[in-house]
Image: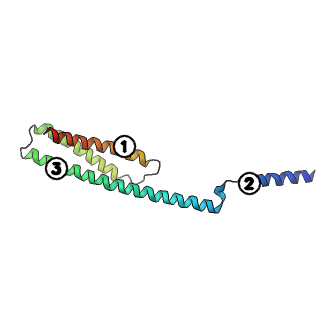
Amino acid sequence: MIARVTAAFFTIILLTCCETPLANDPVNALQGHQDSVQQEKDLAEDFRTFKVRSEATLIKNSRFIADFKVRIMTGEVALKARYQKRLIGLEKQNSDLRNRLEHSTEIHTDSLPAFKKNWNNDMDRVVRLLREMNASH
């Protein structure tokens, strides 16, 4: 009887050891950690590149808005009141985008694509409206 219990006990231990996931293997754990660190580095670099490109677009928008305001003030633009209201709205949207970009320091792998998609959609809308305003005048 004791022999059977001992045999069953060792069989359970042997089966448990064989079914242990590879994550408990120090070599695989180290590789997984290195992969995770590399993924974080890649994410950070991707986000830095995104921020640099986005900031360049924001600066371009700000310059266009400032130039258009000068054109309004010098009388080159008819219907000043209508354009001033649109410019104020676009200037606020551009400023809001800048604030979102500056305050987005904690971006994670799963949230970066959604953040970039939403931000790019909003930026594209501002750029499109600025182009339409320029084309209509």
Residue extending furthest toward the front: 135
- Few, some or many residues within 10 Å of mark 3 (<14, 14–19, 20+): some
Q: Position of residue 133 (x, y in %)?
A: 18, 40
Q: Position of residue 89 (x, y in %)?
A: 22, 41
Q: Position of residue 80 (x, y in %)?
A: 10, 39
Q: Position of residue 102 (x, y in %)?
A: 33, 53
**Would you name the residue on which mark 3 appears?**
66
The CA distance from mark 2 to mark 3 is 70 Å
Q: Amino acid at mark 2?
A: Cys
- Which mark is first along the chain, 2 or 1? 2
Q: Amino acid at mark 1?
A: Asn
- Image depth: mark 1 or mark 2 in front: 2
Q: Amino acid at mark 3?
A: Ala
Per the image, label 1 sits on a secondary structure element best described as helix
**Would you name the residue on which mark 1 appears?**
118
Per the image, label 2 sits on a secondary structure element best described as helix
